Every structure is written in C-alpha cells, then in structure tokens.
Amino acid sequence: MLKNFDVDKYLNGGKETYAQRQNIEALADELAQKDYDNVVMVGIGGTWMEWYPVAMYLRRLSNFPVYLENAAEFVLSKDKPYLSQKSLVLTASASGTTKEILEAVKYCNRKDIDVYGFTKDETTPLDKLLKKSIYNPMGDCEDSYLMYFMLTLRIYEQWGHFKEYKRWADQMAVLHENLLRFRNEFEPRGEIIAQKYHDAPLTMIVGSGMLWGETALFSMCILEEMQWVRTRPVTSAEFFHGALELVDNTLPVFLVKGEDEYRPLDERVERFAKQHTDKFEVFDTKDFVFNGIDDDFRQICSPMIVTAILTERLAALYELNTGHSLDFRRYYRQFDY
Amino acid sequence: MLKNFDVDKYLNGGKETYAQRQNIEALADELAQKDYDNVVMVGIGGTWMEWYPVAMYLRRLSNFPVYLENAAEFVLSKDKPYLSQKSLVLTASASGTTKEILEAVKYCNRKDIDVYGFTKDETTPLDKLLKKSIYNPMGDCEDSYLMYFMLTLRIYEQWGHFKEYKRWADQMAVLHENLLRFRNEFEPRGEIIAQKYHDAPLTMIVGSGMLWGETALFSMCILEEMQWVRTRPVTSAEFFHGALELVDNTLPVFLVKGEDEYRPLDERVERFAKQHTDKFEVFDTKDFVFNGIDDDFRQICSPMIVTAILTERLAALYELNTGHSLDFRRYYRQFDY
C-alpha cells in the first residue's frame, strides 16, 4: 500500500530503537545523580528542530533552565555565560560527522564540559568526542524524538519533575505500529497533495509550539534540501505580521495544526487562509488517534505524527511526482564552503 | 537626492527622539531601584524583531536573565514559569493599537505585573494599560532601537553592567546625521538593486546575530507585507541546512553581513553564494563609517545601519519599481481574523 516504504524494516527499526530503553535509562539514572545548573541541547538543521519540542516540553515540567542552541552559533557566541561544567550538554548526529556538531562538542571538551549524545555506532567521529553515547542508526525522526524524550524525561522523573515516565515509556512500545497505521490513513490524501502541489513556485508552511520544529524540518530538510522545492516556513504567530499579505490563489499554504496551548494561533491561520486561498491544506494531529497511548501523552507524541505523515510520507510522495531523488544533493556535504 | 524622503522631517524626528533621553533616563533610574528577577521584552512582528538585538546585547553584558517573547504566544504559553511580579516587562507599539500587544499587557496586568513601554502619545489604548510610557511617534526603526537601547542600557549602567552608557548616549546625538549620510552613500546602489530584483519570484534573505531581527523585519514587514514580494528569510547558520540547495541563478540571495562574533557564519554564506548564483548582494554594515560614534558602539548601532539602508531606502526604491504603495495592505488590520 505505502509506496517506497518497507514495512518490516520500519517495524524492526522501531523495535531496535525501543530496545535502547535500557541503555538510555541507565545513562539517564547516572546523569540524574549529578548536580547540574542547566540542560543545554545542541543541534543544527534537522537535529536542532528535533530537540525543539523536547526543550519546550521540559520547560513546561519545571523551572529548571533549558537551553536549545544552534551548534554553529554556539561555538562563536558571546552571550552564553550560563555554560559551565555544571551544564548537562546533549547532542546528536546520526552520521556522527556533522561538522558543526563536532566543533560544538570539541568546544565543550576544551572547557572540560562533558557532552552526551546519540550517534549511529561506535565508529563515528562524534562517538570519540562524547563522554557517553547511545547508539542507533536513527533512520527516522520519530526514533530521534523517542530517544531524546526517553533520556530527558527519565532524568526529569529522577529529579521529581515527571511522575508519568514509566507509564509513558511502557506505552511507547506500540508507538511505531500506531505511526505505521497513521501513514496508511494519510496515504490517499498524501498522494493527491503531492500531485497537486509538487511544482508550486513557493509553498508557505505554517506551524506552532510543539510542532514548530518538525514543521521547519519538513520545510527545510525535506522540501528545500531534498526536493529543491521553495518554501516559506513561518510560525502561526508571525504569519499575521508579514506573510499573510502574500496569500492568494497562487500560493499554497500548508498548516500543521497542533494540540498544545498554541492551537488557537493555528486556528486563526486556518480561519484566514481558508478564505483567501483555494490552495490550503491543514494537517491536524488530532485526526490521528493512538491505540494504547494515553491522551495526556499526545503533546509529546504529536511531532512524531507530523514526521510520519509529512517528513516521511509526503516526502516520498513528492519524490514520485518531482522525480527528484530524496538522496541527491548538489551542494550539502559535497565540498567545503 | 534621496527619492521620496524628507530630510528635514527626518532630522527633526531624530531630534525629537533624542530629546526623550531625559524622560527615558528618569524612567530607567526609577526602574533600576527595584528588585527584579529578569527582564522580559514582549513584541510581535517588527516590534519583536526590533527588541531582538537589544535582548542579545544585554545578554552579553551580564548573566541576568533576559527573555524575548512573541506577544501572541506569550499569553497562551505554558512554559514561562519565570514570569512574576519580579519581572521587568517592556513592550512597544507605535500606534498603540496592536491587538496582540494589548492582550499581552492585559495578561500581565491581570497577574499584577507592571508593564512599561513606548507608544505614540497619551491617547493610545496601549498607554492606558502601561504603568508608565515613553511617548514618541517612532516613525523609523532607528528611533525604536535608540529608545529601547537607551532605556535598557541606562538600567544596566545603574546595575553596574554597562559603564559606557554616558559616552554612548552622548554620541547618539549625531546618530541621525550619520544614518542620513549612509542613506546617501547607499542610494545609487539601492536604485540598481531595486530595479534588478523587485520582480524576482523569490528572494532569499540571510543574516545573523545582532542583525537577524532587522534582516527578518526587512523580509517580513517590508517585502512581504508592504510590497507583496515573496521572501525566504534564513539565518546564516541555518542556511547550510536546507536553504542552500535552492541557490542557483534563478534565486537572488541578499546577505546582511554583520560585525559581531557571528560574522564568520555570514562569510561562509558569502563564499558559497558568490560561487552559485550571479544574483547575490552583500549588505555589509562595515562599509558604513560613523563620524563621532566610537567603534566599540558599532554592534549596538549596526541594526540602525541596516534599517536605514534596507528597511527604509531599499523599501522606498522597491516601491518606485513595483508601483505597489508601501501603505497599502489587503488583509493586515483591514478586518478581523
């Protein structure tokens, strides 16, 4: 049913990720013993965007300072006096070769700050720089979210900020089968959307809150980088201060509609865009109903829904229409700049 | 020489703004006496972007927590436990009618948190909600920057974080004549640029650090909102994680090049873009030399340079080419949404 998708490989990959739970919890329990002043997540591009909802969610659970930093800016920055040996620094790079991430970890190491993170395996350059690593090929973004949340929420459980950890982590065993079903539910609509919009001269992509990271990721890492499709990512709040004036029937608008407190901002975009362009698509995470995962975990899981239906499925369906391989880059990682 | 520009009105406006120094310092001195836990700047659209370099600069001067919040998100947010009656909340709206700003101030007032800010005069709805206001028509963004920096840097002087306040504030008396000269220096180049790019299907606009706010403001508030010109604003760091793949001779790229620690990121964009599009323009604040303002204040003043040459001059020159009035909106503030 799903085009260019290997169901067995996906479900096995999910099992492998979930099997890291033991290693992740062991690391979390070790880290939770230490005395930290703040948590610092360092990413770039897609990785920054994947840490985004994690940072946001932790800030809801506690007053404990949580920083999310762009790796390229992080090493140059003059306004981060909070960074010290009492910072818990986390990062990730699946390939383990992302230049800015390696620089950021070296930067911390020069200051005697330990960095912990996620990478493919023990052979990567990143692994050599990290104090401790969790290994996983991390093929899909949902696996990254699962692991990042597992590590940080377990630490927050130990610190007394997230009592629901065990119930949540137990339920994550059925995450991938739910996300597979959502893919199937979305597929017919995705086929129509990809056909209709793949050659639009510009697509505006709007989202907010817990979904902003994944919205930007789909826009930048998939459409721009992997499909050379022009996009204008904008938050639901900012949309009304500039971007709205561009909207008419020549501009497709994609709204990623979330389930957190910013939903009213998404709804405002929806009311507006419905009236001013006939090329308007809403991707509402509420339309996807989990089996075996409690409703109070929907906010944590909502970026995973978006990654399943847009960043994975819609990307694959765009590829079938554009003929542009998702694997082909002309510039990124092709030479030095 | 300058098209659609009234020199006398501009210089008089600058004098009026500077004349607020006394009122601003009196307010600053009063606020500096109080015991605050943090500074919170609340803006939306252009106002958020104008507070951006102010927040960044204050974070360099001290460890004291400084938050910059989007007004629409601020009132809905569940992850801002830092907000209390010990927060120094600052905002601004020239018209004094910006819906989200009014809501944000009401939200604070309901929590018994005083808000201070800037608005046109004592007749505006915002003025009625603020604890104390500074009045100014604030026609140009440089006036906003000047007043926001004056208020906050004076407070930081009193708190022992910015010893250079008096020297800086004294020198700001010649700010507007410098910015007028920069306009004249830029005008011939601006005419060529506006003619060449005003009808581009999409323009990518790149900037970083202290200039990111003004870069985004030019992109969103001028080109998108006031000219209906499609843009893709992106930071110099993020540029290499998605946006770069779009670059070729069909895509103009504008780089706003700054003078802070992120300049190497701008330079990386420059090296790359030069080789991959013949529609590349660099706006380097270093090319504009102040008379009577010391070099160690260039970072504070660099957003003012950008606003003079791009947000004001290039906007006016685009208007002459597009024929699209800078004053005309089809949606914004035209009806409810």
Image (cartoon, coloured by chain):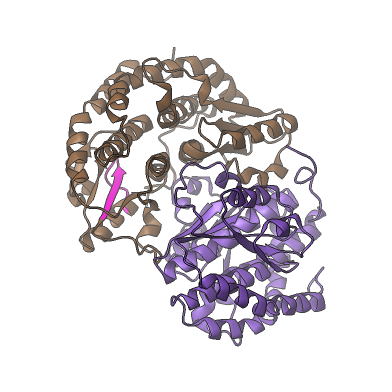
Chain colours: A purple, B brown
Residue B214, position as x, y percentages in the image: 46, 36
Q: In percent of the image, x 49 and y 82: which residue is there?
A: A164
Q: Is residue A190 left or right of residue A166?
A: right
Q: Is residue B42 left or right of residue A224?
A: left
Q: In percent of the image, x 42 and y 26: which residue is there?
A: B296
Which region shows up in magenta?
B87-99
In the rendered image, residue B37 lying in the magenta stretch gets the answer: no
Query: Based on the displayed image, in which of its 4 quarters is residue B231 positioned?
Result: top right
For the question of whether residue A214 can be seen, the reply is no
Quadrant into which the N terminus of chain B falls: top left
Quadrant into which the C terminus of chain B falls: bottom left
Residue A114, position as x, y percentages in the image: 59, 58
Nearer the observer, B192 or A9: A9
Q: Is residue B169 left or right of residue A114?
A: left
Q: In percent of the image, x 56 and y 18: which residue is there?
A: B189
Asked if B220 appears above or below A154 in the picture, the reply is above
